Amino acid sequence: MTNKTNTELSSTPDFIEKDLKNSGLMFTDSRRYIFNLLLKTQTPLTVAELYMLVHKKNPKIGIGIATVYRTIGLLEKMGYLSKLFEENTKSFRYKFYYNYNATNAAIKTHKLIKPIKLTKPIKLQKGFLDANLTAKQSIYNFKDEKEDLSDFEKIGKIQVQLNTWMNDLNKMKREKEFELEDMIKDFGKVDKVIELHHYDKSSLIQMLIDFQSEFNWLPKHILFYTSTKLDVPLTNIYSIASFYKFFNLEPRGKYSIIVCDGTACHVRGSTRLLQRIINILNIKPGDTTSDYKFTLDTVNCLGCCALGPVMVLDDKYYSNPHAKALEKLFKGLD
């Protein structure tokens, strides 16, 4: 093999290609790209820094860090690279170097060059990763090559997690936007009720009745908006809403189920009727189903003791319905 100066070597990548082919190795596009970067770079690099440089030069290139590792190992085995050990950062750096005594026949038996120790951090070349950082300070430095690969795998996992969080945040954002749109629609309904009562503060109770008829309960944003529109203290509105049992400050189901627990109904088995409903809907008295379809309540008397035990659903009275009848009744409601 003809000796080459460093200058000749830098300008003749075909020389390396010839050596590879004579050794029965393929000179792929990925290897060619990595070779050329190493030839043009004078600063000793870690594998991680070389990988970052590859993607900085060409962000769309499909070269993985494993390919960079294999290429570095091949070049080192063939005697093209010198391996430098930096004591301060406990990392290995590689720089292009050609062993002029190596021949094609001796490539397979060529011994690795003994690592050279660097006692001082290497100043990174200006315009490379960061002109103001030393090798010790570079975020691309790691303790050894295994840690390089491990850290890049961690970065990949972190990126996946960040993408998941971003999707969740976008979903939450869309949900909030939908909620805001619904609130704006609700405010329009409140405006119509207030206008119907001519902004008369003395009609506040009737307005609250109208709000509950419209929304089936008194949402907080409705009470806040009413307070602002009528210039009435919010505490006054809450005092009225909490005093009268008719008003609901918690969301209620579309359908209200009321079970009588008065004396006459109790002795006739209202407790068993109530338990059948609890078993079917999986809610307790005072609760609402998760789909806001049913709300279950009990009262002391419904005024129809002869029918006991009795329940009211959608303004209709039912005398002691059995479990199958209840299931059919609940499923039949939209």
Image (cartoon, rainbow, N blue to C red):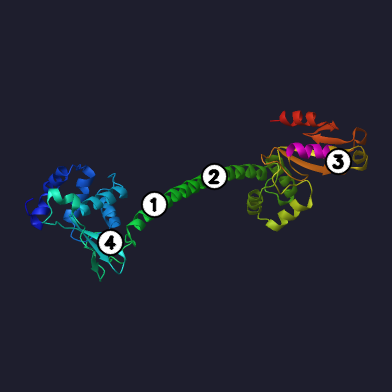
Residue drawn at x 79%, y 34% as measured from the top left: 313
Q: Which of 70 and 103 lies nearest the eye of the viewer?
A: 103
Q: Give the distance between the C-alpha atoms of the residues marked 2 and 4, in whole angstroms.
A: 50 Å
Q: Which of 197 and 66 lies nearest the eye of the viewer?
A: 66
Confirm or deny contact between disc 1 and disc 4 (CB under 8 A): no
Residue 305 against residue 92 in the figure, above or below: above
Residue indicated by mark 2: 175
The quarter of the picture where the C terminus appears is top right
In primary-sequence order, the first of circles 3 and 4 is 4
Residue indicated by mark 3: 271
Q: Amino acid at mark 2?
A: Glu
Residue indicated by mark 1: 153
Magenta stretch, overall SS: helix
The x, y position of residue 112, in whole percent, is 21, 58
The x, y position of residue 129, in whole percent, is 27, 59
- Please name which of the two marks, 1 or 2, marks the residue nearer to the observer: 1
* Secondary structure of the residue carrying numbered label 3: helix
* Secondary structure of the residue carrying numbered label 4: strand
Residue drawn at x 22%, y 46% as measured from the top left: 31
Task: Examine the image and state in which quarter residue 99 appears.
Answer: bottom left
Q: Give the distance between the C-alpha atoms of the residues marked 1 and 4, in whole angstroms.
A: 19 Å
Instruction: Determine whether, in the image, residue 176 is placed left or right of residue 156.
Output: right
The x, y position of residue 153, in whole percent, is 39, 51
Q: Give the distance between the C-alpha atoms of the residues marked 1 and 3, in whole angstroms.
A: 61 Å
Task: Examine the image and state in which quarter residue 294 appears.
Answer: top right
Residue range highlighted in magenta: 273-281
Q: Amino acid at mark 3?
A: Thr
Mark 2: few, some, or many residues within 10 Å (few <14, many ≥20)?
A: few
